[in-house]
Image (cartoon, grey):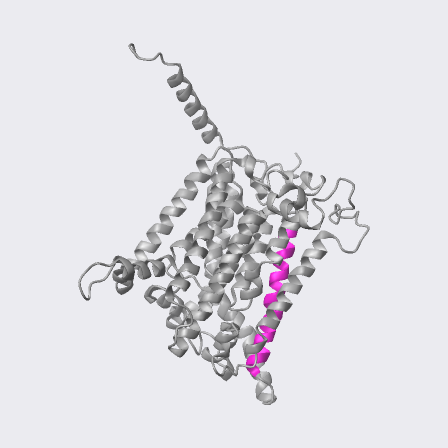
């Protein structure tokens, strides 16, 4: 029996053209002559049939490289580390990568976790050490070099390569929709936050994990997602949708294999640090459990509103202020809301009229984590970028979200500068409004994804592919027999109810 997926079969067909299929792009294309015509020479011909160098895939990859180069230019004012007169805020070029080279003791040759506690999961700490310690050794022999700048630029090269690799993965997953990857390549969020921190390490590993799953390699997918989770925690959330969808498709063995190998990979990476340097390894968990409400979160907006609507006497606090003073309760409430959201996503996955695509559920789960988290750093937007491109590749709402992210980015640096100088740049309400718009646009994307799950006819990806090109063993699989029987019973019950005679007198 052939194991060829529906995605492989569909790849033989014609490619999607956004100026025809996407309403927003179609309207915008009127400025340059309208949608692509029937007799136009397409840039996205099937592989092996290109007559031009500049195919759609190569254009998108070039655009990603351009965005990353512009990001490097935007951060150039901070590369020397001489942050005088708050230049890192006035020019919005702050980066943890450079700041933590000194704060984590890498400039002194300290080995992460062994000599110094690190505030990040272990694979990020390994990554910092793997790039930082050679730079320090080079600086010892060449004291004239700026170690921080060398370290930052080395990170730019590696993280930039991971970003380009993520674009390549999206192109691989969407061979009939190559222009979808342009959403990632041209995203203002990528331009603004690519090297603010090391999040692209987890993004790249998670992207390769999704590609391995799509290629029906659950063991490799699990290992890669486990490694990604050892860099930043969020890729582990993708395992939940994989397991629930595998349950619905009667492919539970593959789902459990991915989850199991992910956990094994996570443990293997953590043990060499957790056993000999337990306290330093636990710094990440300590910080996350003791941190109060952070800027830009749902809880931060609530604290601001507390101050506006609180009608109590002097010294009284609103509910969000109270939570900020009672962090264990805040933690449990945040976890509980995220857990309820995950249960809702699981119910949606099992009860939707058609099995949702993996990317749709993965986006919903990661978005829910950010919505209810007490920490939402500026670069966390990178977590959602590849997922939203795979889940809902439509330009209109995506651009609205990115505009909101730009507004938040500017307001955030205004808030940082105001705090540093004790002279507010904007009224606090401006920052709260920017935070609310960012939150609101992410919620809007979630609502739109849910609507497309409930009405698959709205799904742009399913208008191009027969089922789920990211689904791997799930792609084209029928629902499990138990679910099919349950649906038949529900349909029979509904039919019997409809057939019952109306009570007399009605």
Residue 145 in picture, x, y percent from top left? 60, 86
Residue 439 in picture, x, y percent from top left? 43, 55
Q: Magenta part of the protein: which range? A: 147-172
Which quadrant holds the N terminus? top right
Q: Nearer the viewer, residue 423 or 137?
A: 423
- On the rendered structure, is 123 left or right of 68? left
Residue 495 sits above or below residue 408 on the image: above
Residue 227 sits above or below residue 355 on the image: below
In the picture, residue 19 is in which quadrant?
top right
Which quadrant holds the C terminus? top left
Q: Is residue 390 magenta?
A: no
Residue 193 sits above or below residue 110 on the image: above
Q: Is residue 160 magenta?
A: yes
Q: Nearer the viewer, residue 70 or 196?
A: 70
Instruction: Please identify the residue farthest to the right as the structure is shown.
Output: 51
Q: Which secondary structure class fits the magenta region best? A: helix
Instruction: Please identify the residue farthest to the top as the structure is shown.
Output: 504
In the picture, residue 308 is in which quadrant?
bottom left
Q: Looking at the image, which residue is at 44% across and 79% down?
A: 115
Q: Looking at the image, which residue is at 49% across and 77% down?
A: 99
Residue 132 in picture, x, y percent from top left? 55, 77
């Amino acid at each position: 029996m052939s194991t060829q997926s529906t995605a492989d079969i569909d790849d033989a067909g014609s490619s999607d053209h956004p100026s025809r299929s996407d309403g927003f792009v179609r309207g915008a294309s009127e400025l340059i002559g309208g949608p692509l015509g029937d007799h136009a020479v397409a840039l996205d011909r099937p592989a092996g049939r290109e007559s031009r160098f500049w195919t759609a895939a190569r254009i998108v990859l070039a655009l990603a490289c351009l965005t990353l180069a512009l990001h490097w230019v935007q951060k150039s004012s901070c590369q020397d580390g001489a942050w005088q007169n708050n230049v890192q805020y006035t020019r919005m070029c702050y980066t943890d990568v450079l700041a933590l080279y000194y704060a984590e003791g890498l400039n002194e040759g300290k080995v992460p976790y062994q000599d110094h506690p690190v505030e990040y999961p272990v694979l990020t700490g390994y990554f910092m050490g793997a790039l930082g310690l050679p730079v320090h050794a080079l600086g010892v022999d060449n004291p004239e070099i700026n170690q921080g700048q060398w370290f930052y630029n080395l990170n730019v090269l590696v993280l930039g390569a991971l970003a380009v690799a993520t674009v390549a993965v999206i192109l691989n997953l969407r061979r009939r929709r190559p222009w979808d990857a342009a959403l990632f390549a041209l995203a203002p969020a990528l331009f603004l936050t690519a090297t603010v921190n090391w999040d692209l390490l987890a993004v790249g590993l998670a992207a390769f994990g999704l590609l391995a799953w799509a290629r029906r390699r659950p063991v490799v997918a699990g290992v890669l997602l486990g490694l990604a989770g050892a860099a930043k925690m969020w890729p582990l959330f993708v395992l939940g949708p994989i397991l629930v969808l595998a349950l619905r498709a009667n492919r539970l063995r593959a789902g459990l294999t991915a989850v199991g190998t992910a956990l094994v990979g996570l443990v293997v990476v953590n043990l060499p640090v957790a056993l000999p340097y337990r306290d330093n390894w636990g710094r990440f968990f300590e910080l996350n459990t003791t941190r109060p409400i952070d800027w830009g979160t749902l809880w931060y907006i609530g604290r601001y509103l507390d101050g506006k609507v609180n009608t109590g006497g002097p010294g009284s606090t609103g509910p969000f202020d109270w939570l900020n003073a009672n962090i264990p309760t805040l933690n449990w409430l945040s976890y509980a809301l995220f857990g309820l959201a995950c249960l809702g996503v699981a119910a949606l996955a099992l009860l939707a009229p058609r099995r949702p695509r993996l990317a749709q559920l993965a986006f919903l789960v990661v978005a829910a984590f950010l919505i209810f988290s007490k920490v939402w750093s500026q670069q966390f937007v990178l977590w959602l970028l590849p997922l939203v491109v795979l889940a809902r590749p439509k330009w209109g709402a995506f651009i609205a979200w990115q505009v909101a992210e730009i507004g938040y980015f500017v307001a955030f640096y205004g808030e940082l500068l105001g705090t540093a100088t004790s002279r507010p740049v904007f009224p606090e309400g401006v920052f709260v409004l920017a935070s609310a718009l960012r939150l609101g646009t992410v919620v809007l994307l979630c609502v739109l994804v849910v609507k497309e799950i409930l009405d698959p006819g709205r799904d742009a990806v399913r208008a191009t592919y027969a089922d789920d090109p990211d689904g791997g063993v799930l792609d084209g699989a029928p629902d499990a027999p138990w679910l099919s029987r349950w649906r038949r019973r529900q349909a029979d019950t509904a039919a019997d109810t409809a057939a019952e005679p109306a009570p007399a007198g009605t």
